[in-house]
Amino acid sequence: RKAVIEQVFSRMNDRQREAVFQTEGPLLVLAGAGSGKTTVLIHRIINILRFGHGYDSPYATPGATMEDLAFLADYTADPKPENQARAMELCAVSPAKPWEVVAITFTNKAARELQDRLTRAVGEADASAIWAYTFHTCCLRILRRDIERLGYNRTFTIYDEDDKKRVITDLIRRLKLDEKIFDARKVMGEISRAKDNLITPRTFALEQRSEFYMGRIADLYTLYEKEMRENNALDFDDIIMKTVQLLQDNPDILEHYQRKFRYVLVDEYQDTNHAQYVLTSLLAGGYQNICVVGDDDQSIYKFRGATITNILEFEKQFKNARTIRLEQNYRSTNTILDAANGLIRNNVNRKGKELWTKQEGGSKIKLHRSDTQESEAQYIAARILEGVAKGCKWSDFAILYRNNVLSNAVESAFRRNSIPYRIYKGRDFFSRAEIRDMFAYLWVIENPSDTLRLKRIINVPARKIGARSVEIAEELAAQHNTMLYDIVSHADAYSELGRGAAAMKRFGDMMQELRDMQQTASLSELYDAMLDLSGYQEALENKNDMESRSRLENIMELKSNIVEYENKAEDPSLAGFLEEMALYTDADQDEEEDDTVLMMTMHSAKGLEFPTVFLCGMEDGLFPSFRADESDEDLEEERRLCYVAITRAKQQLYLTCAERRLMYGQTRYARPSRFLQEIPAELLDSNLTERARQAEAEQAQKKAYRPRSTVNQSYRSASALQSSMTTSSVPTFACGDRVMHKAFGEGMITSVKPMGGDQLLEIAFTAKGTKRLMAKSASQFMH
Ligand code: ATP
Ligand code: MG
C-alpha cells in the first residue's frame, strides 16, 4: 500500500507530500508563486478520496487512547520498522466520500480547472459530487436550499453592479441627498465594505449615528436592504453575507453542513475577506479539517475587502494549526524568480520568504522602452511573430496590463499583423443594453418580484405603457402591499390605470404565458418564445439599421450561450443559467481550445502560467498607479500585483513601456515604472541606457541647429524623421507578388490599398489562409 501511495505522489517533493498527507486538522500551506500550492490542493483531494490518511500522518484515529498517542509519539520520534504496521493502523482514517469535500477557489476558471483535474484523477462520477466551487457558487447552493429561512423566496434574483447602482441612485434621489457628495459609486463602496465585514444595516446605523455623512450612508444602507428584500434580490456581497447569517442563525442548517464537510480546502486564501473567512470557519467547524493555501505576497484584493490578516493569523485563528512552507518553484527560470524576489523584498509588511528553482539561468528579462504606445505594441507584436516563426504557439504568449485601457494599442497592433488574440474583457458583453434586456425578461420570468427588472422591460419594445402608468401601478402596489407584477397582471381590475390598463394587462398575460411555458419547455425554447412574444426581435428586424442588426447578433450570441449551457449542465434550469451568467466575471471566459495570444489584466492572471509573458505599460503613474502615491499600503499592494504578474512567466519575461502615451484623450509623458528599478539590473537586457545615449545625441544636434526649439517641436521633428526613415526602408508591394512571411509562410499578395502613409496588404497564404497586414510592420517579417 505504501508503495502504491508513493507511486501516485512520486512527483511531489517532500514538503508537498507532507501537505498532501496531513489530512486531519487545520493546515496552512504558505508559499510563494509557482511552488505548487494549487497542485498540492488537488493532490490532497485525490489522497483523501483514494487513500484516506497518508501513511505518515501524525494524527491518530478518532477514539485513540492515551497509550496509543504515546506510542505514536515514540514512533514519530523513532520510526522503527517493526512498529510501522501498528502506527499505520492507528493513523488510519477512512477515505472520504466525494460529497464530504468542499474546495473553494476564487474564479470560475480556477474552479473549472479544479473540476477538470479531479475528473481526470478520480473519474467523472466522483468528481461531480465534490463541491469544487467559487465562494459565490458554493454559497448560492446553500442559499437555494434554505434561503426561505431568511425570509427570501427561493427564486431570488442576483443584481450586478449596474443594477445595484440604479437602486442606490434612486435612493439617493429619494432622500434628496446631494449627488456630488453622495456619489453612487462611493455609497456602493461603503455598503459593500460593511457587508464584507458582516455589518448589518442595524449595527451600521448604531455605529455611525453621530456623523452626518456616515449617518446618511447608514440610512441608504437600511433602505437598500429593504428594497432588495422587496425585489427578492441579492447582490454579490449578499451572497456571502446571507449565507453566513443563514448558518449562524440556524443551528440545524449549520450542523448539516458541518457534518457533511469532512474536508474543507481553500485556494488563494490571501484574498479572502472577513465574511469569507467566517464562512470557511463555519463550514469547517465540525471536523476542523481545513486546509488553506496561499501566499501573502500575492494578496491583491485589498480594495475589495480582502484582508491579509486571514492568512497571517491563521495559526491563531485555528488551534493546533500546522504551517507548511514550500520554497521550490517549478514554474519559472532562475532569472525570473530572482527578479520577483528582488522586487517583493521592498515590501516591509510581509512574512518573508524566498523561492528557488532548479531551472538555472534562463534568458535575461527584456526591458524595452518605446517612443509611443504604438511602437510599444508593435514591438510586442514583432516578438510574438518571431517566436511563432521559431515554432512557438500563439497561446504560449500572454500580455498582461494593469488597466484595461492599455489593451487598445496592443489590439490594433495584433490586428495589423493578423495575430490571433483573445481578450478577457470581463462583462462587456453583459453590459450591452439588449443583453441586459434579455436578462431582465428572464429574471422576471424566474422571479416576478424583481421590480427593478420588470420596470426595465415593461415598455421595451415600446408597447404604449407610459412612465406615468407605471408610477400609478407602483403606487397601487404599495397601497395593496403587493408587488408591481401583480398589479400589472391584473391591470384591468384597476380603474386608476386608465388607458394604460389594457396594454399593461396584455404585457402581464404575455409574461404569464412565458412563466407557464417554463414548466414544460426547454430553456432555448423558452428564449425563442420570449423573443417572439415580447416583440423584441420583430422590433429590431423592422428597424433594420446597422445598430439593430448588431443587437440582433448579440441576442443570438446569447442564445448560443444558452444552448451551450443546456448541453453542459447536468440539470439545466433557468435559475441555473441565470446564476452562472450572473457570476461570470473577468477571468472566466471559456478557455476554448483555440490557439491564440491571451490578453488580460494582471488581476485576472492570478494562478495562471504562460511560457512568455509581456507586462506592458510599465510606467510610473500607470503602474504603480497614481493612487499608490498616497500611502505605503497601496504601494505595497501594487508591488504585490507586480510580483503576481512577473511570476506568471515560465521562460521569458518582457517588460515594456512607452515614453508618451495617449490616454483618455491626453498625451502623457511618463517615466519607466519604479518597479523596474527594483529588479536587479544584472537580470535585465534593457534598451534604456542606449536610449538615454540617443537622447543625448539628439539633444546635442538640436542645440547645434535650433537653439530654441520647444520640447514638442523636437518630438514632432524626431518622429517625422523616423517615419521618413521607415517609409524609405519599406519595400513597396504589388498585387501578385509572392512573399515569404516568417510566421505565416508562403503567400501571394491579392490586394494592396494605400492607407495613412502605409499600405494595407491582403495576402493569401498557402497554409494559413488570407490575412490582412499593414506593409510597414509586416515588411520586417517578409521577403
Ligand atoms: P500560484 O501562486 O501562482 O497560484 P502555485 O503555488 O499554485 O502558484 P502551481 O500552479 O500549483 O503553483 O504549480 C506551478 C507549476 O509547477 C505547475 O506547472 C505545476 O504543474 C508545477 N509543479 C508543481 N509541483 C511540482 C513538482 N513537484 N514537480 C514538478 N512540477 C511541479
Ligand atoms: Mg495556485
Image (spheres, rainbow, N blue to C red):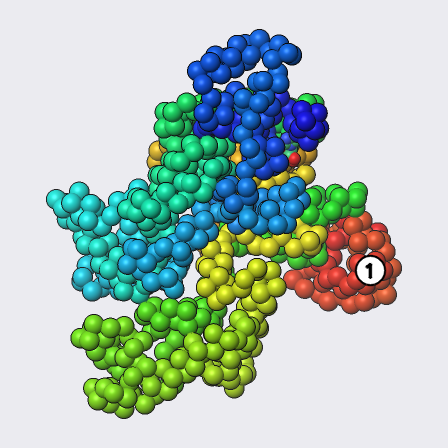
Relative to 457, does residue 174 appear above or below in the rendering?
above
- What SS does tag 1 mark? strand
Q: Does the residue labelled 1 lie within 8 Å of ligand 1?
A: no
Relative to 197, does residue 171 appear above or below in the rendering?
below
Amino acid type indicated by mark 1:
Phe
Relative to 35, does residue 213 appear above or below in the rendering?
below
| Position of residue 578 in the picture relative to residue 567 (left or right) | left
* Residue at screen point 32% across, 58% down: 148
* Residue at screen point 61% across, 50% down: 125
Q: Residue 659, how many percent across, how many down?
A: 54, 42
Out of 589 and 483, give the one closest to the viewer: 483
* Residue at screen point 41% across, 51% down: 142
Residue on which the image places disc 1: 765
Q: Residue 767, how many percent across, how many down?
A: 83, 58
| Position of residue 481 in the picture relative to residue 728 (left or right) | left
Out of 361 and 730, give the one closest to the viewer: 361
Q: Can residue 627 be seen in this view?
A: no
In the picture, which quadrant includes the N terminus? top right
Out of 762 and 434, give the one closest to the viewer: 434
Q: Residue 6, how many percent across, how many down?
A: 68, 26
* Residue at screen point 69% across, 53% down: 593
Splitting the image into 4 quarters, where does residue 98 fall?
top right
Q: Residue 86, how many percent across, how many down?
A: 58, 18
